[in-house]
Image (spheres, grey):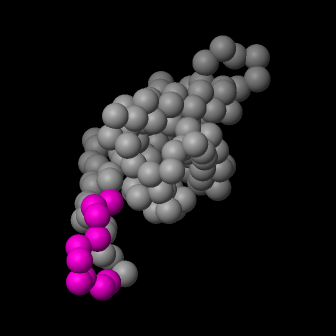
Amino acid sequence: MAPGPISDLRLKQITDDACNSTLSNAETYVHSQTSVWNTSIINNVLQKVISESTPSGQNQPPYKFAVNSTIVQHTEPQAGVESKDAGRRGMHSATGAFWNEDKDGMWSYKYEAGDSKGMDVVISVFWFSV
């Protein structure tokens, strides 16, 4: 697979910044806020990847992007259950695509700071050459 339009390290920084900014005031999972949080994270990531992948002197990048944000609530720990995973929900996510492996790709990331707020936040960024 060809390297993406933005390095993995920079994608991690962009994603961390978007999540930190969006969730800075959140103390715990609040279901009524998840739509707002997801929209903010997605818009922040999209804005940065578009900006940083647009060549100088052009008004759009040579890629189309799609960003997915998933927020999963941790459950309340059960009385009498002692485990490092107590209060955690299981989650598995997978993605498949048919594309040009030389030009298109994807990157996924789990925002680790979400754990302390009672949630898992998983972000995926996809790029498709134009």
Name the image quarter holding residue 31. top left
User: Can you name the residue that lies furthest to the right here?
Assistant: 56
For image coordinates 50% across by 31% down, the residue present is: 40
Vertical order, 100 against 56 (above or below): below
For image coordinates 37% across by 81% down, the residue present is: 84
Q: Which residues are magenta?
A: 74-83
Magenta span: predominant SS is loop
For image coordinates 69% across by 16% down, the residue present is: 58
Can residue 106 be seen here? no
Vertical order, 46 against 13 (above or below): above
Vertical order, 58 against 120 (above or below): above
**In this rendering, position of residue 51 left or right of residue 112:** right
Question: What count of labels does the image hold?
Answer: 0
x%, y% of residue 97?
29, 43
Magenta span includes 77: yes
| Front residue (pair 26, 93) | 26
Name the image quarter holding residue 113. bottom right
User: Can you name the residue that lies furthest to the top here?
Assistant: 59
x%, y% of residue 26?
52, 45
| Front residue (pair 27, 97) | 27
x%, y% of residue 74?
32, 60
Can residue 130 be seen here? yes
Magenta span includes 119: no
For image coordinates 28% across by 64% down, the residue present is: 76
**In this rendering, position of residue 56 left or right of residue 104:** right
